[in-house]
Amino acid sequence: MREFNIAVIPGDGIGKEVIPEGIKALEAATAAFGIQLTFTWFDWSCETYHQTGKMMPDNGLEILKTFDAIYLGAVGFPGVPDHISLWGLLLPIRREFDQYVNLRPVRLFEGLASPLANKAPGDIDFYVVRENVEGEYSNIGGVQYPGSDNEVVVQQSVFTRKGTDRIIKYAFELAQQRDKHLSSATKSNGLYHSMPYWDSRVEAISADYPEVNVDHFHIDIFCANLVRMPEFYDVIVGSNLFGDILSDLGPACTGTIAIAPSANINPDKTFPSMFEPVHGSAPDIAGQNIANPIGTVWAGAMMLQHLGCDDVHDVMMAAIEEVIQRQESLTRDMGGIASTQELGDAIVAAIGNHR
Ligand code: NAI
Ligand code: MG
């Protein structure tokens, strides 16, 4: 019997609505394979920040360390500045647990219309490999002479050899297993130091992967191309900022960002990895019971894959595909009228057909 302990952090807004649906799907899918998941819930969120002044307790990371994986909804809510909620919970987990890979698959499913004209399933099917612990997202910098005419703000980017090389290698490995085509996001014409360095590391590491075709695109034309010809791309590698941008743009081209999952992976398994939907807490629809849980279910499938249960992953993906294709029980963002639970129930029923 395989057993895993999962830390669950629903977080804020629709995070609290989609996570129960993800857990429902995980329980349905693992049952048939004799896998035991034990979920431990943590209410760490902007709400707890209001009560305690902290997004998570001081020993939060110590607590999470003991789990096999972390399953997260979303954090952030009006009333707490976004840099507080992110730097108080999500970013410390990603960084302290060395989850340096943010893996975000993007796929157009049968049954969902792309906002791009004449795109069919198969045309959009790529992975964004985003650097997840350094780069442009840094708290190094400061404000000098605040409030005066001489006010100066400096925000540093951090690109280490170790951090740059390991994400690029991960992307090459993935490209090697897929279509042997890697596209790197850059901006070496504007960012004088960091991006020429990034490009030079892609070039250097490509020597170890002679079968993989590599191309480079500046982030601006990359965004344009992703809309114009998404079928061109297979594995994309980008810095923290560029990967973040491309991994919202990609899913938007597949009909809704709400189906997209995000795996924060520590490939060395020295700490737990964390799995979450790409989307945020969506305060605009929170409490209405219309949030789409598919990104969360898909993230759960990636979690089981990371834990070595490919069989469970495949069943969950088959269920997602079936539900979308049947066009029943879809939420509003996908053109339907179903509630969050109705779509969750439909996924559980479909899991029953595939076990
Ligand atoms: P968002 O992803 O929460 O929402 C963007 C738009 O997509 C909204 O119109 C929302 O209604 C819609 N949407 C998102 N998820 C949906 C779902 N599952 N079903 C149906 N519609 C969905 O991004 P936004 O508005 O930029 O951020 C809101 C809050 O979430 C902020 O506090 C932000 O910092 C936080 N956030 C947290 C993230 C995380 O925890 N990883 C990631 C992104 C944002
Ligand atoms: Mg984002």
Image (cartoon, rainbow, N blue to C red):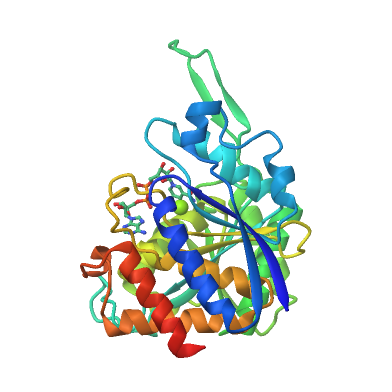
Note whether residue 202 is visible: yes
On screen, residue 102 above or below 229: above
Relative to the observer, which residue lies in front, 103 or 185? 103
**What residue do we see at 44% from left, 12% from top?**
147
Across and down, in percent, residue 127 comes to 52, 72
The residue drawn where x is 49% and y is 14% is 146
- How many labels were placed on the picture? 0
Residue 117 relative to residue 316: left or right: left
Residue 291 at x, y percent in the picture: 33, 58
Q: Residue furthest top?
A: 148
Q: Is residue 212 above or below residue 219?
A: below
Residue 344 placement, left or right of 138: left
Q: Position of residue 178 (x, y in %)?
A: 58, 84
Determine which quarter of the picture holds residue 337: bottom left
Quarter the N terminus occupies: bottom right
* Residue 260 in sight here: no
